[in-house]
Amino acid sequence: MEEEIEFLLDSLVEDMEKPASHLDKALLKLRAGRANPSMLEGVAVEYYGSVVKLTQVANINTPDARTLFVQPFEKGMIGPIEKAILNGNLGFNPQNNGEMIIINIPPLTEDRRRELVRMAKAEGEDAKVGIRAIRKNGMDEAKRLEKDGLSEDSRKAFEDDVQKMVDKYIAIVDSKVATKEDEIMKV
């Protein structure tokens, strides 16, 4: 029975890592004033009849903190890439120089910064909801194990361990969101 509890705790830790790592990816997409290739991660381009990610048809570089260069592997893809960036509703105005697309990242306004902070907090809250759902699954599993012969003391100890894990991961999420908030609000 103890082995089953250890296995269950390990699997809950793995499950709680998923919302935390998803939060990292979501926060990367929120731009904090600096140019970053991940800003264009959600852009899809039509390429010979199929829709592919921008990174599959072009290189994305950041020569400085306010500029993105998108250099297509084929010159004929400049038009479709430019159109895809415009249709991505990212607030960017791409410029085409015939060989590559240049995107100047405008400085963030105070309103936009606050909106990005709200979005970061919403992503953090989504991660917390995911962690709490995993806690509920763990608690349900503990009750099932108690019916299968686990002592009440062992169940309570297991539930305490699960709650400690939940508190730890929620603190990690809060820390990540606070760091991103500081990054966004820094002028």
Image: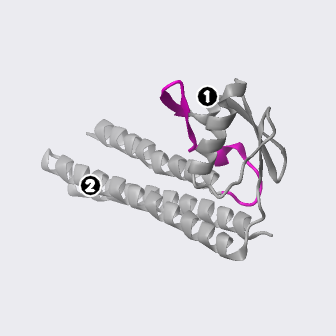
User: Where does the N terminus fall, quadrant-wise?
Assistant: top left
User: Which residue: 80% across, 32% down?
Assistant: 99
Q: Residues within 10 Å of mark 2 (few under 14, many from 20)?
A: some
The residue nearer to you, when weighing 77 against 143, is: 77
- The reply to whether residue 157 is in sight is no
Q: Can you give x and y, in whole percent of width and height, for residue 179 in the image?
A: 67, 63
Answer yes or no: is residue 122 visible: yes
Q: CA distance from mark 1 to mark 2?
A: 50 Å
Residue in front for this viewpoint, 154 or 117: 117
In this rendering, position of residue 36 left or right of residue 132: right
Is residue 88 shown left or right of residue 59? left
Where disc 1 sits, the SS reads: helix
**Circle 1: residue type:** Gln
Regarding mark 2 in the picture, which secondary structure is present there?
Answer: helix
Query: Residue 110 falls in which quadrant of the image?
Result: bottom right
Foreground of the two, 143 or 63: 63
Q: Residue furthest left?
A: 147
Write down the region rendered in magenta: 31-52
Reading the chain from its start, which is encountered first: label 1 or label 2?
1
**Which residue shows up at 62% across the image and 55% down it?**
90
Residue 48 at x, y = what percent? 53, 24
Residue under label 2, please give it.
Answer: 155
Residue 11 percent across, percent down from the top left? 38, 40
Q: Residue at x 58, y 43 (%)?
A: 43
The tag on residue 56 is: 1
Name the residue type under label 2.
Arg
Camera-side mark, 1 or 2: 1
